[in-house]
Image (cartoon, rainbow, N blue to C red):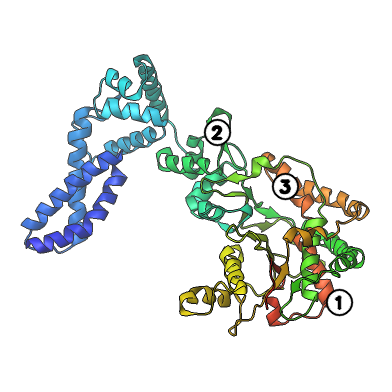
Amino acid sequence: MDKQQADKWIVEYLPKIYGFAMKKAFSYQEAEELSSDIVTEVYLSFLSAKEIVNLDGYVWRISEHVYAKFVSSKKKREGISLDGMDIPDDTPIWDEDSQSELDTLRREIAFLTQMRRRIVYSFYYENKPISSIAKETGMPEGTVKWHLNKARNDLKEGFTMERKIGRLGIKPIEATSFGHGGSPGRNGGPEHYLGNKLNLNIVYSVYHEPRTLVEIAEELGVTPVYIEDTVKELEANGFLVPKAGGRYTTYVNFSPETYSLEQQDKLLQKQMEAAEMLVSEYVPQVRAAMADLQDVYIPSGNRELLEAAAIFYAVKNKCRIEFEADASPYEIKTLDGGRFYAYVDLESTQSDPDYVLSRDYPPYSACGDMTRRSEKYPCVYSWSMDTRYCSREGKWQNNLLSDYEYLYEFMTGAIEDTPANKEKFARLRERGFLSEDNRVRIMVVRGEWDVLFSKLPPLDEENKRIFADFALEQAMLTAKDYPPQMHDFVMMYHTGNFMGTTVALMVMDILYGNGTFKALTEEEKITSNLLMFCDILPV
């Protein structure tokens, strides 16, 4: 074979050969050594071959042959003998029993702690004396001997033990959605860290009971070596929390794997009662509080848009039923600056399949409260809630601070619709904030955001008490489906959100359904439940 063709094929197979070596080797150093040996043998075979019919088969036969020689010359020459567990020098690697024993040894070494793996590898694989290992690790020689003795005992026990794969190793969970409350970091919210199935299942493995690294590995059906770095990364970013005894837990809020439709129905019925009460007694107070607000720009001139936004904000934020508890353990602090509560929704099975809802309910999901504050322009601030009453898309990921900064620059005349600002204007039109003829299409309030929101009245304590007992009772029922470390958070979240997004949307349904507010036009859906605050109004 000519050298040009051999060069082409060896480049093509380099990553595949390294992958083969990684699966067979004990360490990265060993993998590099093995892959180098295989590449050399394969390349020389290419040069000497006249014709190769099955290229894949040819390469893998050579790879297996080199691996057999590698084990025979390196492993057996150094001698793997751990208190009577010998792999005889005269046993060829392709012998089934010998291979099985070697695989078991490799597996059990992987289940040792990182320090003991290092000591075992140095002593048995690299033939280093105790004195050298002690110097490298910074431990007394007696401590090294103690770890080596413990490793021998653990390995002997592992050889006679059948390791069983846990439930997550057989059927790993999958997330249906991710959510967060708070500020995501530069990399994003929990989906950045838990979007990977391995990461997600590592965290979930400690959700219902604390586990050590080894116990996590057994639950997932992998070796500790495989997940060791991932566990450290998840711990550093707050998704795994260390506990006594080397165990981990988590404060990520995973949804239960079963749900009661009857319990959900009772909750929705009670929330509907609350919405009807708010429409008759609380909404008039909010509308009255907005009556004298004049420094506001409304694209369509329909003041109901402002009132609806104020009502939604007030119901969600001024009517909360509080449950006192320490929320600080549940805030995840990531290395990229994130500070948030993390939510993961899982596929869930109905626990009462024969139950039928008392009525049809529309979806009550929403994305918000979203706030954006500019450091570049301190007066620029925004609040929004994306619901089925608006046409905005992309949720929080598409709600960029720069959108409001660009719009402010346009309003102040700092930028004009010229080729130099093409991207900024394209973005504003893509979001619907600016029309093709440069008309601002979202509501803008002149002044500080807290001035408007402070005008909104809180719900009186008497009306809160009407629903407080039910909200608390429902939260307690819900908490039973969660592990103990999540109970305080579940109580806070579900009690506080009884009068939350769902009730706010129910209130909107009533107001738009009974004619109190006119139906929204497509133009008005751009700014429904979106307010921008700054020091000027659009012309």
Left or right: residue 182 versus residue 108 is right
Which class describes the residues within 10 Å of circle 3: few (<14), some (14-19), or many (20+)? many
The C terminus appears in which quarter of the rendering? bottom right
Left or right: residue 246 versus residue 279 is left
Specify the quadrant of the image occupied by residue 14. bottom left
The residue that appears at 63% across and 45% down in the rendered structure is 331
Which class describes the residues within 10 Å of circle 2: few (<14), some (14-19), or many (20+)? some
**In the orientation shown, which residue stands out farthest toward the bottom?**
437
Residue 195 percent coordinates (x, y): 51, 55
The residue that appears at 61% across and 72% down in the rendered structure is 412
Against 447, residue 322 (above or below) is above
Left or right: residue 76 versus residue 344 is left
Label 3: state its secondary structure: helix
**In the orientation shown, which residue stands out farthest toward the front?**
413
Label 2: state its secondary structure: loop
**Mark sitting on residue 475:** none
**Comes first in the chain, label 1 or label 2:** 2
Which numbered mark, 1 or 2, is in the foreground of this view?
1
Q: Nearer the viewer, residue 324 or 67?
A: 324
Identity of the amino acid at label 2?
Answer: Arg
Q: Which residue is mark 3?
A: 490
Q: Which residue is mark 2?
A: 247
Between the C-alphas of marks 2 and 3, the distance is 23 Å
Which class describes the residues within 10 Å of circle 1: few (<14), some (14-19), or many (20+)? few
Q: Which residue is mark 1?
A: 516
